[in-house]
């Protein structure tokens, strides 16, 4: 495409620069044009079309792992756009569903129907809830424990002046590196498997917070928070989850949220 005359202004503090483009100059094309492949279709379960669920296409046929994610519309329809030519594992995830078995396919003009399965129990549905929903079940130390009086007092760290201080430590010192509420953090089953001599959740938490390449740092955070009182909080959280307590079901994407198109080069 040519342009008769284009003047661009670049403004910096105290500087005004005008650049004139001659009529013969052209606007360059994109160096890497978007691929034209796509997969389109509908997601259905035994209850009919599934609105507001994620359709995920993944491939390792390219130089790096490639993932494309979209959300179905009110009628369960979807389109995975701009797919490089490759073989994809395509599957469905949605609240109230269990993850579907991946189907192998390539970009095609022919629409496909993806079968979704409704979760048989609330427990199965909750497996795909975001970690934050599981974390919401954690009951922080009672406000009456603040300010902390230390190991010889109420078990709360003396630097914990209020419940807000403790929650800030949980977010900035713990959740900064770990997705609290993920399966590995909301359970201690793997700890009991590794250390069968441990018998309580409180013991399991103390052991795992002192292990690994950052064990010393995590244990130090635990001491600052207040070891005894904080271990009680973490143990209570995982004990209740182990006993079957579930977070509330999150809503599915609505409205403009369904316009999401996510591309990941992993």
Image (cartoon, grey):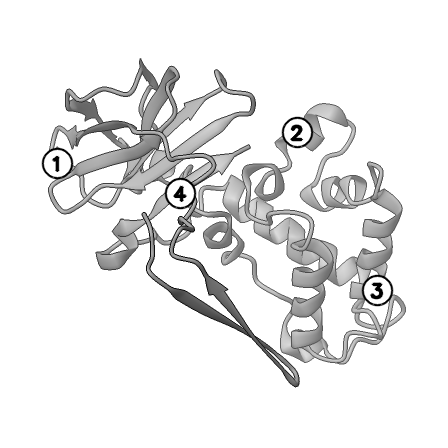
- Can residue 252 be spotted in the picture? no
Mark 4 falls on what kind of element? strand
Q: State the CA–CA distance, disc 4 to disc 1.
A: 22 Å
Q: Do the residues under discs 4 and 2 have CB atoms within 8 angstroms?
A: no
Which residue has dot 1 on it?
A: 49
Q: State the CA–CA distance, disc 1 to disc 2.
A: 38 Å
Query: Which badge, 4 or 3, is on the more N-terminal residue?
Result: 3
Q: State the CA–CA distance, disc 3 to disc 2.
A: 26 Å
Indicate the position of residue 70 as horizontal and vertical percent values: 31, 40
Mark 2 falls on what kind of element? helix
Mark 1 falls on what kind of element? strand
Indicate the position of residue 264 as horizontal and vertical percent values: 48, 37
Query: Which badge, 1 or 3, is on the more N-terminal residue?
Result: 1
Q: State the CA–CA distance, disc 1 to disc 3.
A: 51 Å
State which quadrant residue 41 falls in.
top left
Query: Which badge, 3 or 2, is on the more N-terminal residue?
Result: 2
The numbered dot on residue 7 is none
Which residue has dot 4 on it?
A: 262
Indicate the position of residue 200 as horizontal and vertical percent values: 70, 40
Name the mark nearer the viewer: 4 or 3.
Answer: 4
The residue lying at 79 percent from left, 59 percent from top is 228
Taking 242 as reference, is 105 left or right? Answer: left
Name the mark nearer the viewer: 1 or 3.
Answer: 1
Name the mark nearer the viewer: 4 or 1.
Answer: 4
Query: Which badge, 4 or 2, is on the more N-terminal residue?
Result: 2
The residue lying at 90 percent from left, 69 percent from top is 152
Q: Is residue 121 above or below residue 103?
A: below
Q: Do the residues under discs 3 and 2 have CB atoms within 8 angstroms?
A: no
Name the mark nearer the viewer: 1 or 2.
Answer: 1
Query: Which badge, 4 or 1, is on the more N-terminal residue?
Result: 1
Which residue has dot 3 on it?
A: 224
């Amino acid at each position: 495409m040519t342009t008769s005359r284009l003047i661009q202004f670049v403004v910096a503090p105290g500087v005004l620069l005008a650049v004139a483009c001659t009529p013969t100059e052209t606007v360059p094309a994109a160096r890497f044009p978007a691929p034209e492949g796509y997969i389109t279709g509908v997601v259905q379960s035994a209850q009919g079309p599934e609105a507001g669920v994620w359709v995920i296409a993944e491939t390792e046929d390219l130089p790096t792992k490639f993932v494309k994610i979209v959300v179905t519309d009110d009628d369960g329809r979807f389109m995975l756009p701009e797919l490089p030519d490759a073989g994809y594992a395509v599957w469905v995830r949605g609240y109230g569903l269990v993850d579907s078995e991946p189907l192998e396919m390539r970009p095609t003009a022919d629409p496909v129907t993806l079968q979704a399965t409704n979760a048989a129990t609330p427990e199965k549905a909750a497996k795909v809830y975001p970690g934050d929903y599981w974390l919401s079940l954690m009951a922080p130390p009672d406000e009456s424990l603040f300010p902390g009086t230390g190991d010889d007092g109420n078990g709360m760290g003396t630097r914990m002046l209020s419940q807000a201080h403790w929650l800030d430590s949980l977010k900035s010192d713990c959740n900064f590196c770990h997705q609290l509420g993920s399966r590995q953090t909301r359970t201690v089953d793997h700890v009991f498997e590794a250390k069968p001599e441990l018998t309580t959740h409180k013991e399991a938490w103390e052991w795992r917070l002192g292990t690994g390449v950052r064990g010393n740092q995590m244990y130090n955070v635990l001491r600052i928070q207040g070891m005894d009182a904080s271990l009680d909080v973490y143990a209570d959280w995982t004990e209740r989850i182990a006993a079957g307590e579930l977070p509330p079901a999150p809503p599915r994407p609505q409205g403009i949220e369904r316009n999401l198109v996510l591309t990941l080069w992993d």
